[in-house]
Image: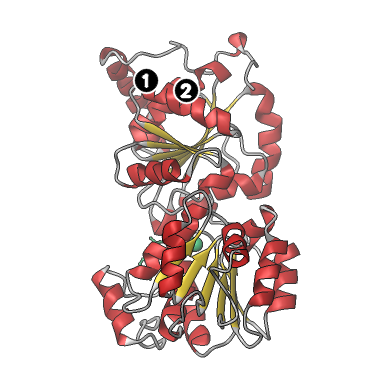
Amino acid sequence: MPPTFAQLGAPDFIVSALAQRGISQPFAIQAATVADALAGRDVCGRAPTGSGKTLAFGIPLVAGVGSAQPRKPRALVLAPTRELADQIKTELRTFAGKRRVGVAYGGVGYGSQIGSLRRGVDILVACPGRLEDLISQGEANLSAVDKVVIDEADRMADMGFIPAVRRLLDQTAAKRQTMLFSATLDGDVATLTRDYQHNPVRHEVGDTTPDVSAADHLFWSVARTDRTDICAEAIDAAGSTVVFCRTRHGCDRVAKQLNRRGVAAAALHGGRSQPQRTRALAEFTAGKVQALVATDVAARGIHVEGVGAVVHYDLAADHKTYLHRSGRTARAGLGGVVVSLIQPEQVKELKSMQRKMGLEQPVTDVDVAEIRQPSRSRTRRRTLEHSAAKRQSGRRRGSKNRSGSRGRQRSSQR
Ligand code: ADP
Ligand code: MG
C-alpha cells in the first residue's frame, strides 16, 4: 500500500481539502517528495507531465509557508508561462486554507497584482519578467522568501529565462528551501541545481521521456491543402482536441478555418492579449470550444482534463517537441489519441523522429474511425460505415480524396 497524504505528513486541513476534490491517493512523485519537502529539504524532482508535480511542491509550500508582510511574500513559485502560473494558483487555492496565494505575470494590468501584494501575499506564483518589473517598481521584495519552487525548469531554460531566474533567486533569503521540478534534469537545469540547491534529494519518477504508450499514435498522409478538413473531422470524432501549429499566424488561420467548418476553435499563442488567452483556455476547459489551436510555447504545462486528442497540424520540430505536445492528452492515466498530419516530403524526417521515441507506426491513409474506436482490428468496417454516414450527413469537405492526394501537393504556406 502506498502511503496516504496524512502518512506523508500533510496537515489535516490539506488532507480534507484534497479529499473533497476526490484526491486521496498520492501519485508517485508526491509519495516520493512530500515527506522530504515537508522536512525542509531541498528537492530536485523529475517526472513527466501530468504526474502531479503541482501537489508535490504545493502541499509542502502551503503546510510550511509563513505569513507575509505587505509586498514581502514568503514563498515564491516561478513558472515559465502565464497560463501555467494561473493554473498553479488555482490548484493551490483549493487547499490553501487561510494562506494567501497571489500571482504576478505580464500581459494584464498591474492594478490587482499590486493591490494584493500590498495587502500581503504568502505564496506568490510568478513569471520572471513581470516579477522583476514589480520589484523594480518597489511593489515586491523577495528578501523574506524562504521557500522557492522552480516549476518546469527545463521549459524555463528553453525560453531563455535562466538569467532572470538567477537574478530573482539571488534576492531571496540565503537560508531557504529550494525545490526544482522539471521533465529533464540536464544542461542548464543541472547548473541551476548545482548553484542554487543545497544538498538536494533527487527523485526521478517515470521514464526520462513522457510515456508515449499512454496514447494511440496515428500518422496520416494528408495533402497540405486537405489538412483543415481532416483536422475538423478528427476533432468531431475526438471531442476536445489540442491542435498544434508552428506559428502564431498559422494558429489564427487554422482556428478561423475550423470555425468556418462548424468546429468551435480558439487560438492560444503569445501574440494574443492575456484576456484573450485566458478566455480561450476557459472556453476550452468548459467545453464551449472543442479545439484549442496553439503554438508549442503557449501550450506548455497547460493541464486540461479529458483532452481526447492532440493533432500535430504542423509536424513537430523534433522528438522532444512531439512528446511535449502529445503529453496534452492521455494525462493522469486516461487514454487519448495523437494524430500527425504528414506530407510525403516529411516522411523521412518523421521516421528519424519516430526512431528516437521508439514509435514504429507506419504512415497510413486517413482513417477517422481509428479515433472513435482505436482498436485497429475493428476499424476497417467502421471506417467504411463511418465515411458513408459522414457523406450522407452532408458535411462539407474540401476534397473527396482523403488519402493524401499526392498529385495536388502545394507548398504555399508562410
Ligand atoms: P504536472 O505538473 O506533473 O504536469 P499536475 O500537477 O498538473 O501535473 O497534475 C495533473 C492532474 O492530476 C491535475 O488535474 C491534478 O489535479 C491531478 N492530480 C494530481 N495529484 C493527484 C492525486 N494524487 N490523485 C488524483 N489526481 C491528482
Ligand atoms: Mg506542472
| Front one among 325 and 167 | 167
Q: Does residue 358 appear anywhere in the picture? A: no
**Residue 231 in the image: above or below residue 39:** above
| Front one among 122 and 407 | 122
- Left or right, 206 with reference to 167: left
Of the numbered discs 2 and 1, the one sitting upstream in the chain is: 2
Residue 272 x/y as whole percent? 50, 38
Q: Does residue 4 appear anywhere in the picture? A: yes
- Left or right, 253 with reference to 343: left
| Label 2 close to label 1 by CB (< 8 Å) | yes
Residue beneath disc 1? 261
Bin the neighbour count of mark 1 within 10 Å (Cα to Cα): few under 14, some 14-19, many 20 and up.
some
**Residue 170 in the image: above or below residue 303:** below
**Which quadrant does the N terminus fall into?**
bottom left
Measuring 66% from the left and 29% from the top, which residue is drawn there? Answer: 347
- Left or right, 356 with reference to 405: right
Residue beneath disc 2? 228
Instruction: Indicate the secondary structure of the residue bearing disc 1.
Output: loop
Residue 149 x/y as whole percent? 56, 73
Measuring 29% from the left and 83% from the top, which residue is drawn there? Answer: 13
